[in-house]
Image: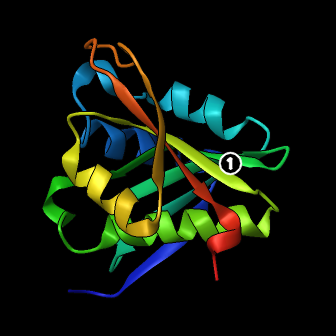
């Protein structure tokens, strides 16, 4: 595999992020360029874009506010899955959250997304709850949490 690195990107990458998101999620779950730009303009939001060689392969969007962090979305294009990229994005998120003095990192993941659940479990996330009918298709989400003090 080509070299892999994570670049911190901002509002100028909203359309790239939207394109990646569209390549990973069902139409009703996709975030367009305007949604990405709006989120990127929000306080505490940062994005790690993972590149394989020079090709964007996925990203993670993290929001850190008042000692807590939330992974808003994480995606890896299908052609790049099962290569450890999602785990690298999760690790980047945890390191970024720790650097911003977050004590906990939260996220929601579909009850049907077993691959993502495995990545998060391997990183040390634990289930803290469940949100009924959270996603547009009516499916439930698991609420997962990670104690940042465990980083390092």
Position of 61 relative to 120 (above/below): above
Q: Tag 1's secondary structure?
A: strand
Image vertical order of residue 57 relative to residue 22, above or below = below
Residue 55 percent across, percent down from the top left: 32, 68
Q: Is residue 1 above or below residue 76?
A: below
Q: Position of residue 45 (x, y in %)?
A: 69, 46
Residue at the left extreme, as displayed? 79
Q: Is residue 97 left or right of residue 114?
A: right
Residue ID at (85%, 44%): 66
Front residue of 85/50: it is: 85
Give the quadrant of the C terminus.
bottom right
Number of marks in the rendered image? 1
Q: Height in image: 139 above or below 73?
A: above
> Nearest the camera: 152 or 128?
128
- Point out residue 109 in the picture as x, y percentages from the top left corner: 37, 38
Residue at image position (41%, 38%) is 18
Residue 152 makes an appearance in the image = yes
In the rendered image, which residue does mark 1 sit on? 69
Q: Quadrant of the N terminus?
A: bottom left
- Residue at 20%, 65% (x, y): give it: 80
Q: Quadrant of residue 52?
A: bottom left
Residue plotted at (47% across, 57% down) = 125
Q: Is residue 56 visible?
A: no
- Measured from the top left, where is residue 96 in percent x and y? 67, 66
Residue density around tag 1, few if under 14, some if 14–19, many if 20 or more, within 10 Å: many
Horizontal side of 93 relative to 133 (left or right) equals right
- Render colour scheme: rainbow
């Amino acid at each position: 595999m080509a070299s892999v690195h994570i670049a911190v990107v901002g509002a100028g990458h909203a359309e790239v992020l939207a394109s990646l998101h569209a390549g990973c999620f069902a139409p009703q779950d996709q975030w367009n360029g305007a949604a990405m730009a709006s989120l990127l303009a929000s306080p505490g939001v940062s994005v790690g874009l993972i590149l394989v060689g020079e090709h964007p392969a996925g990203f993670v969007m993290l929001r850190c506010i008042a000692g807590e962090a939330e992974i808003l979305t994480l995606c890896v294009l299908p052609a790049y899955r099962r290569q450890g990229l999602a785990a690298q994005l999760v690790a980047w998120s945890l390191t970024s959250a720790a650097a911003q003095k977050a004590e906990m990192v939260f996220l929601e993941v579909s009850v049907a997304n077993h691959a993502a659940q495995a990545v998060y479990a391997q990183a040390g996330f634990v289930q803290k709850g469940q949100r009924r009918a959270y996603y547009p298709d009516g499916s439930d989400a698991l609420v997962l949490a990670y104690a940042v003090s465990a980083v390092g």
